[in-house]
Each structure stands twice: as structure tokens, then as C-alpha cells.
């Protein structure tokens, strides 16, 4: 692939990652970063920042300049359920996109980065799908109780707090 075409392609990817950062960050503020959902979205934002960083570093290494204009990020703000569905749809769209791009790469480093982006998009989609289909408080309660099941007396006491 020509260097200029590659830089243009990677800048489009960088724009997608930038849009995801903004969307997750704004939603984390709306949820409150001290809430379980808000903290999770803030963590996701940091992961998206790494994606953007990797792409920006490759673009720079290729002699290009990272374009920091975010792409449009379609989402339905009707309620929490539709917002999470939007996240799943967005991340699912990126999986085949990144894999297709990775297949076009001769450079093993760029190929690995794009494959990693696809894999992490898949993880993000899977991790975002829970609240769209289940009652979030019950799901979190079950998760917390399951995680607290251990022999430690201190943690056994904490387990009862979640009930």
C-alpha cells in the first residue's frame, strides 16, 4: 500500500478512536465516575486513548501528521439501554473493518496493531452488551457476590453488604 494511502487510512481509524474517546468520556461524566458504570466507561476511555496513541505513533513514523478531528459517532441517547446498544453496534462495526485492514498490511507491527484494535473492539462490544439485555443492578449484584465468594473473613463481611 502506498505510504500516503496508508496514512489516510490510519487517520480515518484515528478519527474513529477519537470519537469513541469523546463518547465514552461524556457518558462517564453523565453516569458519575464514582459509579460502577461511570468508572467502567472512564476505563474504556483510557483504552481507546491507547488505540489512538498507537495509530498516531504509526502515522508519525510513516512521516504523516495525525488528524485529530473526531469522526461522527452515531448513538441513540433515548435511554441507557439504547446508548449501550449504540456502543455495541459501533464496536461491532470496527471488528471486520480492522481485520480487513490488517490483512492488507505487509508491515508486521501495523498488522498487529490493527488486529489488536479488532480484538479489543470485540471485547468492548461483549462488555457493553450486558446492560442492554439484563437488569444492570441485578447483574452487578450477582457479579459482586460471585467475586466476593472466598474464604477471607474480611471479604465475607463485605459480601453481605451487597445484598
Image (tube, rainbow, N blue to C red):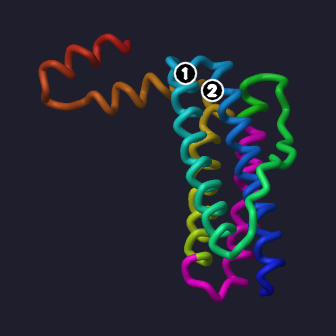
**In magenta stretch: residue 104:** yes
92 up-or-down from 4: above or below: above
Q: At x 82% / y 69%, what residue is drawn?
A: 8
- The earlier-in-sequence mark between 1 and 2 is 2
Residue 163: numbered disc: none
Residue name at image x 59 percent, y 17 percent: 32
Residue under label 2, please give it: 28
Q: Position of residue 18 (x, y in %)?
A: 72, 47
CA separation, marks 1 and 2?
6 Å
Query: Which residue does the image show at 60% across and 24% down from the upper left?
Result: 135
Dot 1 and dot 2 residues touching (CB under 8 Å): yes
Stretch of the chain drawn in magenta: 85-109
Q: At 84% across and 24% down in the image, what residue appears?
A: 78
Main SS, magenta region, reads helix
Q: Which residue is mark 1?
A: 33
Return the x and y of residue 142 as percentages of the image width and height.
42, 27
User: Which secondary structure lies at badge 2?
Assistant: helix
Amino acid at each position: 500500500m502506498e505510504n500516503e494511502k496508508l496514512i489516510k487510512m490510519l487517520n480515518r481509524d484515528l478519527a474513529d478512536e477519537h470519537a469513541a474517546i469523546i463518547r465514552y468520556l461524556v457518558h462517564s461524566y453523565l453516569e458519575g465516575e464514582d459509579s460502577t458504570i461511570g468508572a467502567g466507561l472512564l476505563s474504556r476511555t483510557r483504552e481507546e486513548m491507547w488505540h489512538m496513541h498507537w495509530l498516531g505513533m504509526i502515522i508519525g513514523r510513516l512521516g504523516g501528521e495525525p488528524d485529530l478531528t473526531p469522526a461522527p459517532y452515531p448513538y441513540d441517547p433515548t435511554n441507557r439501554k439504547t446508548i449501550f446498544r449504540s456502543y455495541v453496534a459501533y464496536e461491532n462495526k470496527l471488528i471486520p473493518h480492522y481485520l480487513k485492514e490488517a490483512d492488507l498490511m505487509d508491515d508486521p507491527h501495523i498488522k498487529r496493531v490493527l488486529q489488536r484494535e479488532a480484538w479489543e473492539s470485540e471485547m468492548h462490544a461483549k462488555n457493553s452488551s450486558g446492560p442492554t439485555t439484563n437488569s444492570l443492578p441485578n447483574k452487578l449484584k450477582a457479579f459482586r457476590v460471585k467475586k466476593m465468594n472466598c474464604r477471607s473473613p474480611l471479604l465475607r463481611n463485605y459480601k453481605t453488604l451487597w445484598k
